Amino acid sequence: MNKEFFGEKVRLARLMNGLTQQELGDLVIVSRQFIHQLESGIKQPADDTLAAIAEVLHVTQKFFYIPLANDVKPEQCHFRKRRTTPVNLSNRVLALGTIFEQLVHILDRNLELPHIDFPDINISNVLTAEDIERSAEECRRYWGLGNDAPISNMIRVLENAGAVITCFDGVSDKVDALSINRNRPIIVRNNAKESICRMRFDLAHETAHIVLHQGVETGCSKTESEANAFASAFLFPRAAFIREFHGCVGNIRINWDKVYALKLRWKMSVRAIMYRAYYLGLLTAQQFRSANVYLNKSGQTKTEHFDDKIPNEHPEILSAALDILYQDMNISIYGIAEKLGISEKIIAQLTGFDLSKQVKHNNVRSLSLAR
């Protein structure tokens, strides 16, 4: 074991658990100032104090002797409403993202994950509405989706392009979907979303950040509006929308049967369809307002009619990779946790992996022997 103690790993583990310096100090019966000095590298803990800190933070003592490499930076994490996201929550996501990327790196090193294949679209510094429409169409063409048919499975599209999709248990339900723009794109989704349509839109929104906003700090109204516009165009391309929305609206009244038929075909919420129609000039302001009043009064603010008719989508790559490591290479999730110096509880939180699928054995292959 490297004998150099890295105080910054105390901070990483503390943030990963959503604790302040004062809260961690109270739990291990030391002062906030002492925790600050540990994290700053001014002091090193006694053995019993280090053991207590490791236990509280769900890591091993080894964790603090592994240098911190390439932690996730705030500008690489695309939060919705960055300015109103609590600092402790955003810091926790950054810390979890740092550990999760190390897990993904282990998978990448031992398995052949899908090639990272997001389009490199030439865009101007000032995006126009036309730029966004064309970027979404180009992205669909790049991935062989065409611009005339619905996307059957949004998660599969992104996983095939090399993204890793997960849910940070206990954290993701507090934020909308977010993306971390690293060597391999990471998308953290919100499992608490009531509607599959909303979840698909969130994933398309994060696709926009990865494609349009590399190196751009997002979370402001401008970048969020751009991502929403891209998501709408990506899920329901303009030419197809104009063609198929025809007949949904008469001189005044909306034909809701036809609108819901579009929802079921394109797997896009009615509210999003109404907004897209208004955005493209197919609805007047009065018609758009009336549509939203109808949705609100009919109790369709969070869930809509026929949501249950649209099949759910689940990430496949992460779980399959962990299964292959275990079944074909005898590398368990417990071995991965040991390699990273964290508890299997944190691995499960990061991946949603069911720990009961693997048994903790002493004869499981060590990751130090993995290629």
Image (cartoon, helix red, strand yellow):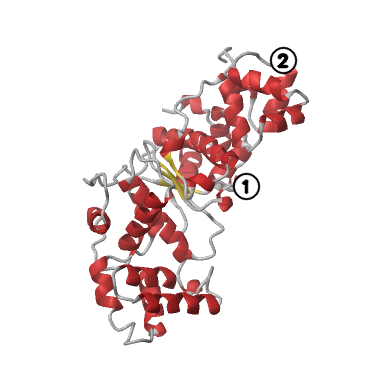
Residue 268 sits in quarter = bottom left
Depth check, front residue: 302 or 109: 302
SS for callout 1: helix
In depth, the one of 349 and 127 nearer the eye is 127
Quarter where residue 48 is shown? top right
Q: Nearer the viewer, residue 253 or 244?
A: 253
Image quarter hosting the C terminus: top left
Which residue corresponds to the image point at 54% horizontal and 29% vertical from the top-left?
A: 340
Can you say whether 58 is above or below 153 in the image? above
- Which amino acid type is shown beneath numbered disc 1? Ser
Front tag of 1 and 2? 2
Q: Residue at x 48, y 52 (%)?
A: 177
Q: Dot 2 corresponds to which residue?
A: 46
Relative to 274, residue 136 above or below: above
**Quadrant of the rendered structure where residue 186 is?**
top left
134 relative to 234 in the view: left or right:
left
Q: Residues within 10 Å of mark 2 (few under 14, many from 20)?
A: few
Q: Is residue 301 left or right of residue 361?
A: left
Of 297 and 193, the residue lying toward us: 297
**Mark 1: few, some, or many residues within 10 Å (few <14, many ≥20)?**
few
Return the mark for residue 356.
1
Amino acid, disc 2: Ala
On the image, the x and y values in percent for residue 227 come to: 36, 54
In the rendered image, the quadrant that contains the N terminus is top right
Residue 80: x and y in percent read: 47, 50
